Image (cartoon, rainbow, N blue to C red):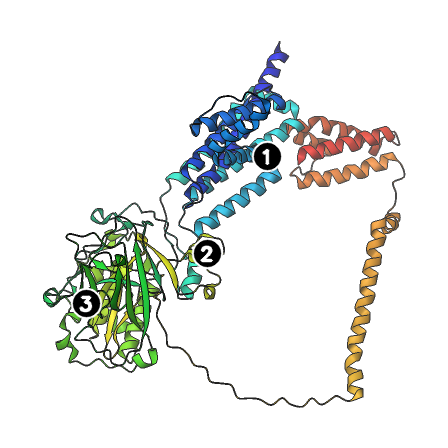
Amino acid sequence: MADRIRSSLASSFNWFGRAVHIALVGLFLLQYVLWAGKEEAMWWPETVVHVEWTLAVTAFVLMIPKLSWRWRTVLMIATFFVHNALLTNLAISQLPDSFAAFGSWLGYLLAQMTPYVWFSFGACIVYVFANWYAKQKRNIYVWMIATILFFCIRDSFSTLVLWPQVAMVLFCGLMLLILRHFAEFQRKAPKSWEHIAQYPSAVLMPIVMMMAAVVLLGVYTPTIQPLLTDPYTAWKHAKGEAVLLASKGEISDWVAPAQDTSSGYGRNDRDLGGGFRFDYTPVFTVDTTEKSYWRGETRSVYNGSGWELANSERRASVTNARVGSALRPESRIDTSLVQTKEVVQTFKFYDGQSFPVLFAAKTAQQLQEINGGAEPAPVLWASEQSELRFRGERTTYPKQYTVVSQVPIVDEKQLKQVVIDSSLRAALPEYFQLPQGLPQRVRTLAEQVTQDAATPYEKVKKLEQYLNMNFKYTNTPDESKGRSEDFVDRFLFELKEGYCDYYSSAMVVMTRSLGIPARWVKGYSSGTTSLQDEISQGLLGNILPSMIDDSGTYTVRNSDAHSWAEVYFPGYGWIPFEPTSGFAMPLIQPEVVSEPLPEIEPEPVVPAPAAEQEQTGTPVLALSISGGITAVLAALAAVLWRTGWLKRQLRRKKPEPVDFSQRVVIEFERLLRYCKRKGYRRQEHETLRESFARWMAKSRWIADDLEVLLGLFERAKYGKGTVGEEDYQLAVRTMQHLRMQLK
């Protein structure tokens, strides 16, 4: 009766271990499904649901005990088609009346379940294979490490957040390794396993508690900001390029409640700050001949917390932006020295989008087409701000328009020669404006940063580089660290982190404090082309930027909403600057004309004397002969070793044991060295019998083998030839079994 109960307990424990193994494999595979569901346009939501149900149904069928594989396969196929039929609302027509019509009837059913049925079928096959594959520790290690590496790399080089998947993969992998360890322990030490099977809680409870503590600690540990920049971002920044879709879209524990919004084109600029969540919803596409920032509105008055229009700007006259007519340039701005490049852009907006302006690359020159010419354009041109304003009281925002811009060519050599005349303060007073309450340390910092710069342009570049390199970009700045009432002062000296509004505002205020006219601009950054999206979502990153042409169709999202600075240089107009860390403004540089290299006549080749040729060739010939001899000898040694002749010659040099007693003693000494490597050490003060007694008390499952080996060793060592061939073979088998248990 006791044996029957013990056998029943062992059988139940075995089934429980098998069920847990199947469940862990399914949970492991589920992480791939969750990852696929997060990838944009990779799997449909319906596909994810079908595959999840397939994993659940397959796990249930695999867990059924005492079922042959034949019936298990039939049941799996039946449940597979049933759950797919239910999920796809399968319409079953009249059953076929003949065997010939059965194929057409089945094809009709499969067509209704396509393509989900094939995803489900693949998931089922993968589940069965993975359940078999995870029966060995080595395979579990390979699978777990490869998956974690893949998820970590995909997480780092995309907008996806895959940390929950990494944690669950680690948990499943460790639990599978524990189950494999128990399975090997049961095979190697059946007596000890019987004791564990009768009292499983003594072993399982500590393991479950430890794993639960680790998981809970990982889940509820507060998010810690990284101390170092990841290699990909650092590499992109070193090249002066923006990091495409760098943020994960997560928000930290603290944000300003009033600013806890999604990213997008802001309407209110009077009070800047707080945090936001990244929204990657597409807003528009722009087909352009040159990559650019898409300029929207400008602001000139800094009020200490944000930006406003100056009174002169509010009263400035506006004109109708007639399609096909040239737009009037700014009247107070001198652009007589600047060279420009014509850029043609066609904007196409997604449904439901509306803005107070029409976007364009700097600076708009002509509105070529709007909505295909189907209706008049309710667009106004504010020349003093270079803004295309949309007047949409009675009409909806245009779905499409084409605009031509004249983008300045930034020639740094010429800009370094520009001098800012004090008379500009009277002509452009709003672009020098600073609030009376601006802290003095903001002005002092601007002077310190630019003290080594000789010209206005060099000073502005110094400010741009200082902000770009010394402040951390984050969409959730910790405003609780701020005490100053001034927005820029709080960013520069207290927060020291923020996003584009912080950087651009600081850039404009610091530039004005140096007596250089500047204004704040908002719009959208360039967006990404389909090629850039593929590169940024892959594992290679942007390793071949030269292959990406600046022209093409760019997709612009809410997350691309951006602000930057424009600085006025007489003769060259408004030049844009990008102070935000991680961003790089596309500027048109003057073409570099390389001077032709002077022609160099080839020197005549004088043949060397015969003696020198022989002397030079001799070492080469010697090395060739030496290398050939070495290769031949190595090949000969390999052949001899392969055939076994060299092994036999080496073995002859070793003294052969005289009898089986000596053989047992030699094998026993090898076993002791193996045991030492496995942690079973013999102390110097112990006899061999005392060491074995201590080992048997420590590991009861090896007691039988140790007793057999100890008796054989003592007979072989002290019995004067009483060990025969059968005893030697028994010793060898016992040693092999002991080694297997100690692995």
Figure quadrant of the N terminus = top right
**Considering the numbered disc 2 on the image, is that residue within a helix, a strand or a loop?**
helix
Image-based side of 279 in relation to 35, left or right: left
> What residue does disc 2 label?
535
Toward which corner of the image does residue 611 lie, by quadrant? bottom right
Q: Amino acid at mark 1?
A: Phe
661, 410: nearer the viewer: 410
Query: Mark 2 or mark 1, which is nearer to you?
Result: 2
> What residue does disc 3 label?
385
How far is mark 2 from mark 3, CA to CA? Answer: 37 Å
Q: Earlier in the sequence, mark 2 or mark 1?
A: 1
Q: Amino acid at mark 3?
A: Gln
Task: Name the residue: 16% across, 57% down.
Answer: 391
50, 372: nearer the viewer: 372
**Considering the numbered disc 3 on the image, is that residue within a helix, a strand or a loop?**
loop
Image-based side of 235 in relation to 139, left or right: left
- Residue 439: give x, y in percent of width and height: 17, 65
Q: Residues within 10 Å of mark 1 (few under 14, many from 20)?
A: few
77, 444: nearer the viewer: 77
In this view, 697 is above or below 324: above
Are the residues tagged 1 and 3 within 8 Å (C-beta)?
no
> What residue does disc 1 label?
129
